[in-house]
Amino acid sequence: MLDFLWPWAFTLLLLPLLVRLLPPASESLGAAIRAPFSARWQRLQGEGRVSASVSTLRVVGLFLAWVCIVTAIARPQWVGEPIELPNTGRDLMLSLDLSGSMQIRDMQVGNRTISRVEAVKAIASDFTERRVGDRVGLILFGSKAYVQAPLTFDTTTVTQFIREAQLGFAGEDTAIGDALGLAIKRLRDRPAASRVLILLTDGQDTASSVEPIEAAALAAQQNVKVYTIGISRNLGTTSARGGEVDEALLRAIAEATGGEYFRARDPKELQAIYGIIDQLEPVEQDASTFRPRRSLSYWAMLAGLLLGSLVLLTGGVLTGLTPRNVGATS
């Protein structure tokens, strides 16, 4: 279906007519033309007829070019068939710790040991790929917290962002409270029953400007359910910054918001935790559709420019082919 974003632009089609209606500039009358020979007079009459035809063609052509340009200004769009968006799902923010301690290699996979961040990226990316029908967002935090991906149905892009995340993106410390506060800000305008945050960290809060417990209380007020995951092979393992997983804090955050705390000592447990969270019941939302749109403005503009150029070029050629010039060449 063809649609115009600025249909009012078609009022510009009247502009040439308004210019035409303007009073002409006064012109002084020149001397009368004398035609002493009838043959010469007939030739002049022929020139007038040809010139009038050429002029009419040029006016029509230039007006059509103007129509094309005005159409381009009106921003025509081709609107496709409606596509229905998923009508079930959650608004789920994933908040991942990228502090310096995440480089510790204590995650056992078979006969080899990998770093915590490698295990988290592999399992979290697999988790987001399966969230069909959910809006998923990504927050990365260390000394600071920032939104890497806003809530979106495009889980493929979120998954790619997780895989590309690198230690040092957000600093060496751990700002759990700031990450929680930022997630609340992003989720509070979504339907109350669908707000979910998964927060994963391997340390203690050492850099937040907002106390984590205060942020948890605000999350509870905003109906944001928080699932916390502490990742460390052994309880009490110190991080590169001298801390350890603060299980008491993570458990308190989860309990205050109606969520649950999980402890992941290896990738297999982390995978199982995400599997449990993956079982959350979807929340019904209003069905919505969107229609893909494709701009056609450049085609209309190109047609107007080509038509105008063609009129100017061919008009000059036709004007030159008058009976006088034809007779002169014969």
Image (cartoon, helix red, strand yellow):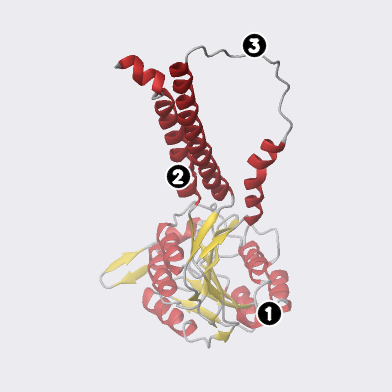
Q: Which residue sits at x=46%, y=70%?
A: 232
Residue ID for mark 2: 303
Q: Which type of secondary structure does the marked residue at label 3 adopt?
A: loop
Mark 3 or mark 1, which has the lower sequence index?
3
Residue that carries the numbered disc 3 in the rendered image: 31
Depth check, front residue: 289 or 321: 321
Horizontal side of 279 relative to 9 (left or right) equals left
Q: How many marks?
A: 3
**Measured from the top left, where is residue 175 in percent x and y?**
61, 60
**Mark whose residue sits in front, 2 or 1:** 2
| Res 240 seen here | no
CA distance separating discs 2 and 1: 55 Å
Q: How crowded is mark 3: few (under 14 residues within 10 Å), some or many (20 or more)?
A: few
Image position of 150 (left or right of 302)? right
Kindly indicate whether the residue at mark 1 contacts the one at mark 3 (C-beta within 8 angstroms): no
Q: Above or below — where is 178 with respect to 309?
A: below
Q: What residue type is labelled 1?
A: Asn
Q: In which quarter of the image is residue 159?
A: bottom left
Closer to the N terminus: mark 2 or mark 3? 3
**Residue 317 can be seen in this image:** yes
Mark toward the start of the polypeptide (2 vs 1): 1
| Label placed on residue 223 | 1
Type of the residue with mark 2: Ala
Q: Nearer the viewer, mark 3 or mark 1?
A: 3
Q: 87 or 167, which lies in front?
A: 87
Q: Which secondary structure lies at badge 1?
A: loop
Count neighbours of disc 2 (C-alpha within 10 A) and say few if under 14, some if 14 to 19, many if 20 or more. some
Residue 287 in percent (x, y) is at 57, 81
The answer to which of 268 and 291 lies nearer the viewer is: 291
Image coordinates for residue 59, horizontal then vertical, percent = 53, 37
Q: Quadrant of the C terminus?
A: top left
The residue at 45%/16% (across/down) is 40
